[in-house]
Amino acid sequence: MRRREPVPFRMAGPGGVVELPSTIAGIRSRLPEDERVQFDHEVRATGAGDLPAVLARWAMHIPTELDDAEEALVLRLKEGDFSGLTFSDDSDDSWRSTG
């Protein structure tokens, strides 16, 4: 039987979409070293039904090239600068129309 390649997690942020590993080994290898022991402990203690959610959450700890843009956006919002943002209440929802 041929093994399928694991489908990566795809995470969206203000700078675009990034693909992250979705296997235990792949996630562990890309985590910051100081988080690996905690990751190992949590994965070993997680039931099979909860494992996909736990892996997805840990994958979001992996540093990516989009982190700087996201941190800059969060800092700007914390400082009260909401320029360029559109809130759902300000939208006419025309994009949701089925026609």
Image: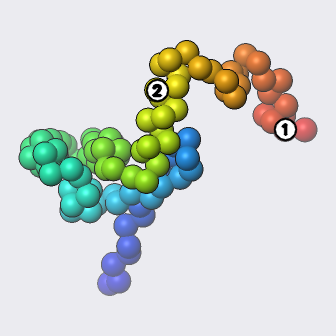
Amino acid at dot 2: Leu
- Residue named by callout 2: 75
| Distance (Cα) linking label 1 and label 2 | 37 Å
Residue 27 seen by the camera = yes
- The one nearer the camera, 17 or 77, is 77
The x, y position of residue 30, in whole percent, is 26, 58
Task: Report the residue marked by disc 1.
Answer: 98
Residue 24 appears anywhere in the view: no
x and y, in percent, of residue 42 in the image: 15, 41
Quadrant position of residue 57: top left
**Of circles 1 and 2, which is in front?**
2
Q: Quadrant of residue 24?
A: bottom left
In the figure, is residue 33 to the left or right of 22?
left
Q: Residue at x 46, y 26 (%)?
A: 75
Label 2: how many residues lie within 10 Å, few (<14), some (14-19) or many (20+)?
few
Q: Quadrant of the C terminus?
A: top right
